[in-house]
Image: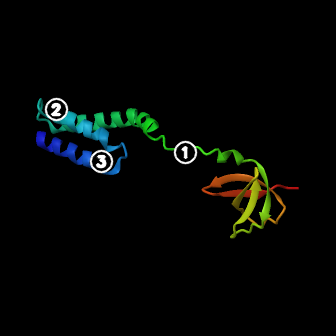
Amino acid sequence: MVYIWLGVALILAAIEVATISFTTIWFVISGLLAMAVSFFTDSLLIQFAVFVIVGVILLATTRPLIRKFINKNDTKTNADRIIGMEGIVTEEIRKNKNGEVKVDGKRWTAYAEGKIEVDSTVEVLEINGVKIKVRKVGK
């Protein structure tokens, strides 16, 4: 059974290297632990239980912590500060046609649920890439 658990650990390690998802790495560790347990017992049930239980415990307890430290590639641009601000439509917006809105001194490509005329006041609802979603302010 030693070679089977070693094979399982190597296959899972290859999957982790290929995906970098921080999911199978915990089962690589539990596979190596199950391999160590196979030196002491021939019971496949005990070995498999060690593999599953240790893998699930490691996954549940350490993965969120690791992802918090590894996933730091969010680039803050301060663009989200315009959400909730009001702007002026400089180019008409239609339901299926983007227009343009001036918000905080900058021009943005904008879209909306319906038609909004030039010189209308709008509120920025959200930013999607380089476009903003707006709605007409009721005046």
CA distance for labels 2 and 3: 23 Å
C-beta proximity under 8 Å, tags 2 and 3:
no
The answer to which of marks 2 and 3 sits earlier in the sequence is 3
Residue 1 visible, this orientation? no
Would you name the residue on which mark 2 appears? 36
Badge 1, how many Cα within 10 Å: few under 14, some, many 20+? few
> In front of the other: label 2 or label 1?
1
> In front of the other: label 2 or label 3?
3
State the SS at label 2: helix
For residue 100, side relative to residue 66 (left or right): right
Would you name the residue on which mark 1 appears? 75
Badge 3, how many Cα within 10 Å: few under 14, some, many 20+? few
**Foreground: 128 or 63?**
128
Q: Residue at position x 25%, y 36% from top?
A: 30
The answer to which of marks 1 and 3 sits earlier in the sequence is 3
Q: Is residue 121 above or below residue 63?
A: below
Q: Residue at position x 85%, y 55% from top?
A: 138
CA distance for labels 1 and 3: 25 Å
Q: Residue at position x 52%, y 44% from top?
A: 74
Q: Quadrant of residue 99?
A: bottom right
Image location of residue 14, percent across then percent down: 25, 48
Would you name the residue on which mark 3 appears? 17
State the SS at label 1: loop
Q: Residue at position x 35%, y 47% from top?
A: 20
Residue 95 visible, this orientation? yes
Image location of residue 105, percent across then percent down: 76, 52
**Foreground: 46 or 57?**
57
Tag 1: residue type? Thr
The answer to which of marks 2 and 1 sits earlier in the sequence is 2
Image quadrant occupied by the N terminus: top left
